[in-house]
Amino acid sequence: MKDLIILGTGHTREKCPYDSEVWGVNGAYSERVKRKDGIFRMDKLFLTDVLWTASGIIHLISRI
């Protein structure tokens, strides 16, 4: 059986070891710019709660 990390957007995402397949949701990809060690890999990204503009630009809808 293969290991899988499902990476969310909570504050603990910075602790992800990226030592197996990584699936991220919504803004999890933004962790790439925050990591000082340069370690980042996301095999799949699932976006939910999105809004497309008329020009084709995607915007994530925040639920604050």
Image (cartoon, rainbow, N blue to C red):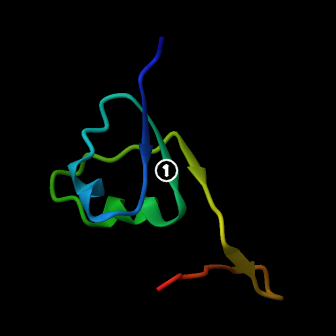
Taking the spot 83% from the left edge, 88% from the top edge, the residue there is: 54
Taking the spot 54% from the left edge, 63% from the top edge, the residue there is: 26
Looking at the image, which is closer to me, 12 or 28? 12
Q: Is residue 24 above or below residue 58?
A: above
Taking the spot 24% from the left edge, 56% from the top edge, the residue there is: 14
- Residue 53 in which image quadrant: bottom right
Taking the spot 41% from the left edge, 22% from the top edge, the residue there is: 3
Q: Position of residue 25 (x, y in %)?
A: 52, 56
Provide the residue designation for mark 1. 24
Is 54 positioned to the left or the right of 27 in the image? Answer: right
Inspect the image, locate mark 1, and give the three-letter code of the amino acid beneath it: Gly
Q: Residue furthest right?
A: 54
Q: Is residue 53 above or below residue 25?
A: below
Q: Position of residue 2 (x, y in %)?
A: 46, 17
Is 48 positioned to the left or the right of 23 in the image? Answer: right
**Secondary structure state at the residue bearing disc 1:** strand
Q: Residue furthest front?
A: 64
Q: Is residue 22 above or below residue 64?
A: above
Count of numbered tags? 1
Looking at the image, which is closer to me, 26 or 38? 26
Q: Is residue 34 above or below residue 38?
A: below
